[in-house]
Amino acid sequence: MEEMRDPRLGTVRLFLKHDDNKARKLKYNLGHPRVLSFGGAHSGHLRALARAGMEHGFETIGVVRGEERLPLNPSLAYAKACGMRLTYLDRAAYRLKHTAPVLDGLRERFGDVAILPEGGSNAAAVRGCAELPGEIDVDYDLICCPVGTGGTLAGIAAGLPEGKRALGFAVLKGAAFLADEVARLQREAYGEVSGNWDLDLDYHFGGYAKLSPSLDPAFEQVYVAKMIYGIVDRARQGAFAPGTRVVAVVTGQPSTPVASWGAPTGFDSGDPR
Ligand SMILES: Cc1ncc(COP(=O)(O)O)c(C=O)c1O
C-alpha cells in the first residue's frame, strides 16, 4: 500500500490499495463446468472470466455487445486465446440481455450453463469483494472505489468493520439507479442493506469510457483515474473531516497493456486469432 501525496489533499491522507476486483467477483462464482457472461468489446470482466476458465478447466462463453469485428481487438483476442467462445448480441438485444427471452435463447443454444450478469456482479461476487477490507493493513476511516455495475462497492461496504464508511465514484453518466443496484446486490447477498456507503455521481466526465485531459495518466482511465480525481476534488472542497484517512481501491492498471493480462498458455502474440 502506498500513500499518494498531493497538496490539494490538505490534511486528508490518501492510501492506494492495488486490488483485482474482477478476480474477487469470480471467486465464489466458479464451480460450474460451463460459464457464460456478458460484456462490451473491451470488457475486463470477460477477460478475467476467460482466464479463470483456462486456469481452472471450465468452459467459458462471452456474449459481446455489438457486431463482430475482425480482426478481434486485443481484449477479445486474449479472451479467445484463453479458450472463450465468443458470440455477439446487437445493441438492442444486448439491452435486453438479462430478460427471460434472451436468457432462454442462450440456454437453448449453449445448454447447461451458469450465467453471470454483466460485470460479474451478483450475490456471490458481493461476498468475494466483502473480503477486501480484511486485507487492508493501514488504519483508515473511508474506503473509496470506482463503480461500474455496483458489485464491488456493495461487497466492500458489506465487509467493512464498524465505524468505517465506503464511498463509490460512478463512472457512468446518469447513474442514480446504481444506488438501488448496490442496495439490491447487498440484499441478495446478505438479506439486508448496510447503511455505511454513499455514491458520488459527479465524476463521470461525460459518461462511461469518456476521457478527459484532467484525468491523471498515471492511473487506468475508465475507472481509477475518475475516482482519484473525485477524491482529490472532494478533499479540496473540504468534504472530508480534517485528518480523514482514505483508502482508494485501485482496480486497474494504466492503459492495460496486453502484456499485463499475462499471456495464456499457447498464446502467440503474433497470432491474429
Ligand atoms: C478496473 C475496474 N474497476 C472498477 C470496476 C467497477 O466494478 P463494479 O462493476 O463492481 O462496480 C470495474 C468493472 O468491473 C473494473 O473493470
Image (cartoon, rainbow, N blue to C red):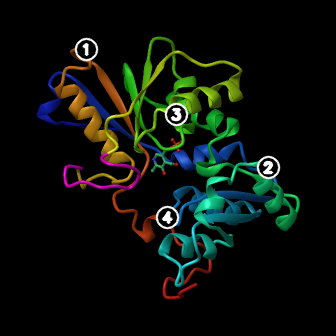
Tag 2 near tag 3, CB within 8 Å? no
Q: In this view, does 249 lie to the left or right of 126?
A: left
- Report helix, strand or loop for mark 3: helix
Gap in angstroms between the C-alphas marked 4 and 2: 25 Å
Query: Circle 1 sits on which residue?
Result: 241
Query: Circle 2 sits on which residue?
Result: 100
Q: Position of residue 76 (x, y in %)?
A: 55, 71
Q: Is residue 118 magenta?
A: no
Gap in angstroms between the C-alphas marked 2 and 3: 21 Å
Q: Which of marks 3 and 1 is nearer the N terminus?
A: 3
Q: Magenta: predominant secondary structure element?
A: loop
For disc 2, the neighbor class at 10 Å (few under 14, some 14 to 19, many from 20) is few
Q: Nearer the viewer, residue 5 or 186?
A: 186
Query: Circle 4 sits on which residue?
Result: 42
Query: Circle 3 sits on which residue?
Result: 177
- Tell me which segment is drawn in magenta: 205-215
